[in-house]
């Protein structure tokens, strides 16, 4: 494939998504007056955070797995997408200094297949064990007029707590000169799959061809493409707890859709930007393969995928077992790549 690809050409328009947020944000913020306590976060953060009457802080996060589910359906592999679901929610809580406490799931499907549902929920249970939070229940909806028999979708909702707002990590302590560290991802995680499918010319209408592509072994991956793409999202909750105990952390960012380019600025205060040094971490083989095969620019890769960095840590301390990938510089809330 010689044509240069980007996320928009794969059918996902990040700019349109940002515009949609801007269109609804003002009206949505008018509902904040109904909350009886104090709102500590604005719309658009990694999670919604409020202060309760006893000064304890509660955070809420919701997310899904995205079109990674399409591959799980084609491959008939449903054991790990529940881990992805939990990860996408609890990581967003943990980066604010919140401890995930409880989780709910929503499973929508065209046909209830009990054995498949059991596999999905077992993955959610495993994710909750990894995050040390309780699965309190959920909802299963069978909707044959909306989904085909083999199709399903997942959504998750997590709640976390902190003892007080002083325990939160909001990014307000980030200052010019601080170091930016990156913790490795376990792979593609749960973002960018539309571009990945486009890169490997996966046509979901051609099931047999799709299975053949996904079952192809790539020497650089040391396994099949499908096995690589189904690797579950890493849950960073325990690592974050340990880092908070050992280091003075000024900011944490979960690197999901938007990559390093768009996620780091979400926690930066005024007059601060992130300068990221290319080549300062080991980029996993799957990203090099997607980049080469799709003729995708590095900038587009770092706007679409985590590109090997699943969590960013900003501190003056020296963080062990992490890549030093950049520093905070003076600027207006952007990520620059050098």
Image (spheres, rainbow, N blue to C red):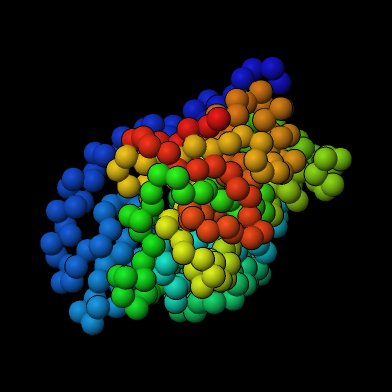
Of the pair 53 and 134, the residue shown nearer to us: 53
Of the pair 142 and 301, the residue shown nearer to us: 301
Residue 321 appears in the figure: yes
Q: Is residue 159 above or below residue 288?
A: below
Q: Residue 6 sits in which quadrant?
A: top right
Q: Which residue lies most toward the top here?
A: 2
Q: Horizontal and vertical percent for residue 256?
A: 51, 48
Of the pair 12 and 203, the residue shown nearer to us: 12
Quadrant assignment for the N terminus: top right
Total numbered labels: 0
Q: Is residue 276 above or below residue 92?
A: above
Q: Residue 61 sits in which quadrant?
A: bottom left
Quadrant assignment for the C terminus: top right
Q: Horizontal and vertical percent for residue 137?
A: 46, 76
Of the pair 237 and 217, the residue shown nearer to us: 237
Q: Horizontal and vertical percent for residue 250?
A: 42, 58
Say which residue appears at 49% left-offset and 79% top-offset.
134
Say which residue appears at 61% left-offset and 41% top-offset.
307
Q: Horizontal and vertical percent for residue 208?
A: 76, 39
Say which residue appears at 41% left-offset and 69% top-offset.
98
166 vs 156, left or right, is left
Q: Which residue lies most toward the bottom here?
A: 54
289 vs 47, left or right, is right
Say which residue appears at 75% left-offset and 51% top-offset.
227
Residue 204 appears in the figure: no
């Amino acid at each position: 494939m010689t044509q240069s690809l980007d996320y928009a050409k794969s059918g996902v328009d990040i700019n349109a998504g940002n515009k949609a947020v801007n269109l609804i944000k003002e009206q949505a913020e008018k509902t904040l007056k109904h909350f009886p306590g104090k709102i500590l976060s604005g719309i658009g953060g990694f999670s919604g955070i409020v202060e309760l009457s006893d000064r304890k802080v509660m955070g809420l996060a919701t997310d899904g797995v995205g079109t990674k589910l399409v591959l799980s359906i084609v491959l008939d592999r449903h054991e790990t997408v529940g881990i992805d679901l939990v990860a996408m929610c609890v990581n967003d809580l943990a980066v604010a200094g919140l401890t995930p406490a409880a989780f709910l799931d929503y499973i929508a499907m065209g046909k209830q297949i009990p054995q498949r549902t059991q596999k999905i929920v077992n993955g959610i249970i495993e994710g909750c064990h990894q995050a040390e939070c309780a699965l309190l229940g959920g909802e299963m909806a069978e909707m044959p007029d909306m989904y085909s028999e083999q199709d399903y979708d997942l959504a998750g909702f997590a709640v976390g707590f902190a003892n007080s707002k002083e325990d939160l990590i909001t990014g307000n302590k980030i200052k010019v000169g601080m170091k930016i560290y990156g913790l490795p991802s376990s792979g593609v995680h749960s973002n960018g799959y539309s571009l990945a499918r486009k890169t490997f010319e996966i046509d979901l209408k051609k099931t047999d061809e799709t299975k053949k592509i996904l079952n192809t072994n790539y020497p650089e991956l040391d396994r099949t493409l499908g096995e690589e793409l189904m690797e579950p999202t890493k849950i960073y909750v325990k690592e974050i707890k340990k880092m908070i105990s050992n280091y003075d952390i000024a900011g944490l960012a979960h690197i999901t859709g938007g990559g390093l380019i768009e996620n780091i600025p979400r926690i930066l205060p005024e007059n601060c930007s992130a300068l990221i040094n290319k080549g300062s971490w080991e980029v996993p083989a799957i990203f090099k393969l997607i980049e080469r095969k799709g003729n995708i620019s590095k900038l587009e890769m770092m706007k679409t995928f985590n590109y090997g960095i699943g969590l960013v840590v900003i501190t003056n301390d020296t963080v062990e077992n992490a890549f030093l990938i950049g520093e905070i510089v003076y600027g207006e809330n952007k990520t620059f790549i050098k």
